Image (tube, rainbow, N blue to C red):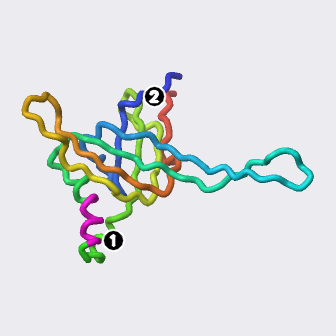
Amino acid sequence: MDPYKSYAFQVFFGQNTTAVAAVSKISALKRSSDVIEYREGGNKIILKGLGRTKYEPITLERGITQDPDFITWADAAQRLDQGHAATSLANLRREVRLQLMNEDGQPVHGYIIHRCWVSEFQALPDLDAGANAIAVEHIKLENEGWEVDPSVVEVTET
């Protein structure tokens, strides 16, 4: 069995069943745990225990489109700062689903990323009339952990 390619994926915000438009790059899902070293009386060996676990922020990039998903979510925190808590608080944190696709375009592996919120939003890149590039926007998502999505399973041929 061949490993999956890293270029075929979809991202979903919240309960949406439509993928976020034009996402072209996602940073790695990464977690690390602190190591607590300790000694027990009479034992010459330093023991190592599990400490706090930290989940790294995730960055999503896409070419700028008419789709408002990035800016709407990024603006939720700004509206909260301006005193519009009733409408913005519900939109501040979301679950994000990430699905890796096989060569036939079927989801074969997925993750659920919990309690995400936008800590950084880049609405426009540097603009250069002499360049030949796509205008890219990005968001940085803080999160409180992720897990394998059990609803996404590989389709096997019979």
**Where is residue 45 shown, x and y percent of the image?**
84, 44
- At horizontal 34% and vertical 70% (from top left) the residue drawn is 90
Q: Residues within 10 Å of mark 1 (few under 14, many from 20)?
A: few
Q: Amino acid at mark 2?
A: Tyr
Asked whether, in this view, residue 47 is left or right of residue 43, the answer is left
**Where is residue 60 shown, x and y percent of the image?**
33, 44
Q: Amino acid at mark 1?
A: Leu
Q: Is residue 78 magenta?
A: yes
User: Which marked residue is nearer to the observer: mark 2 or mark 1?
Assistant: 1
Q: Which structural element holds mark 2?
A: loop
Q: Magenta span covers which residues?
A: 73-81
Q: Is residue 76 above or below residue 28?
A: below
Q: Which residue sits furthest top?
A: 2
Q: Alpha-carbon distance for marks 2 and 1?
A: 37 Å
Q: Residues within 10 Å of mark 2 (few under 14, many from 20)?
A: few
Q: Which mark is residue 4?
A: 2
- At horizontal 89% and vertical 55% (from top left) the residue drawn is 41
Asked whether, in this view, residue 72 is left or right of residue 57, the answer is left
Asked whether, in this view, residue 91 is left or right of residue 112, the answer is left
The residue wearing badge 1 is: 89
Q: Is residue 25 magenta?
A: no
